[in-house]
Image (tube, rainbow, N blue to C red):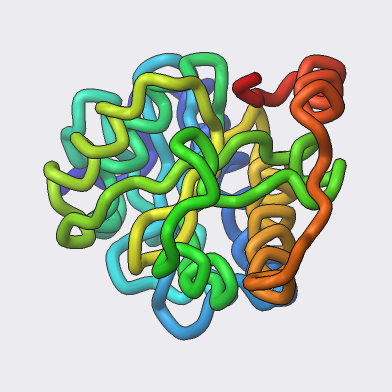
Amino acid sequence: MGTRPVGNADVAALIEQASADLVATGAAIETAGLCRGSSGNMSLRVGDDLLVMTPSGSLLGDLDPGALSVVAFDGRHLAGEAPSKELPLHLEMYRKNPSHRAVIHVHSPFAIAASCLEPWSEFSALPPLTPYFVMRAGQTPLVPYAHPGSNELAGHLRQISRPFSSALLQNHGQITSNATLESALDSAIEVEEAARATLLTAGKRARTLTPDEACELAERNGTMWTP
């Protein structure tokens, strides 16, 4: 495919900065214990028409900025190595949340475990056990299983009508989007902590935030919670 730079000097500079940001975030994801081996992928939107994305099979904690994939928003591979097979899933998250610039998908252990359980409710697989989950992630629906990387999986995500920026993928992991990589990572960490708390309290009479408390927190912090 193409080689960098893509387009004019300004676009090339934006791609270079996005690549550096993805490398730093990949290291932070590994430090946070959210991925193992070559699992997981990230992307960052550049302008309206481009994504910089981790390549297929890459180690998030040891990314080569020169090998990151540059992809058009219509899915065309423009430069770098081949993008992750989860590109359709990322594109669907951006379409669902047009103002967001970053998507992170990881196979974090507690999120995987929680994704194998029946969801807490129709609109959120995880209950509002802590204010921080609502503040940083918001309602997190369960996306029905389909083969990883398939258009069917992206279609399942698209069919969820309620708004969300974090989701569990059934028997698979989690995905988050946000305005920046830093905030998307904060959301992913909070989803993992919420999944851990959910598993620790499973089968017990756990107290959750009330609907009014959760909705007030979501409104104040710009996340989403269905009354």
Marker count (numbered): 0
Quarter of the rendering containing residue 180: top right
Percent from the top left, x then y, of residue 81? Answer: 27, 59
Percent from the top left, x then y, of residue 181? Answer: 65, 42
Q: Which sits in the foreground, 4 or 183?
A: 183
Quadrant showing the C terminus:
top right
Query: Residue extending furthest front?
Result: 205
**156 relative position to 123: left or right:** left
- The answer to whether any part of residue 78 appears in the image is no
Q: Is residue 52 above or below residue 24?
A: above
Percent from the top left, x then y, of residue 11? Answer: 47, 24
Percent from the top left, x then y, of residue 84? Answer: 29, 57
Q: Is residue 226 above or below residue 139?
A: above
Q: Which sits in the foreground, 111 or 81?
A: 111
Residue for point 64% across, 71% down: 202
**11 relative position to 110: left or right:** left
- The answer to whether any part of residue 144 appears in the image is yes
Residue for point 49% across, 27% down: 46
Q: Is residue 101 above or below residue 71?
A: above
Residue for point 50% across, 59% down: 65
Q: Which sits in the foreground, 9 or 140?
A: 140
Q: Which sits in the foreground, 183 or 140?
A: 140
Residue for point 28% across, 28% down: 158
Quarter of the rendering containing residue 85: bottom left
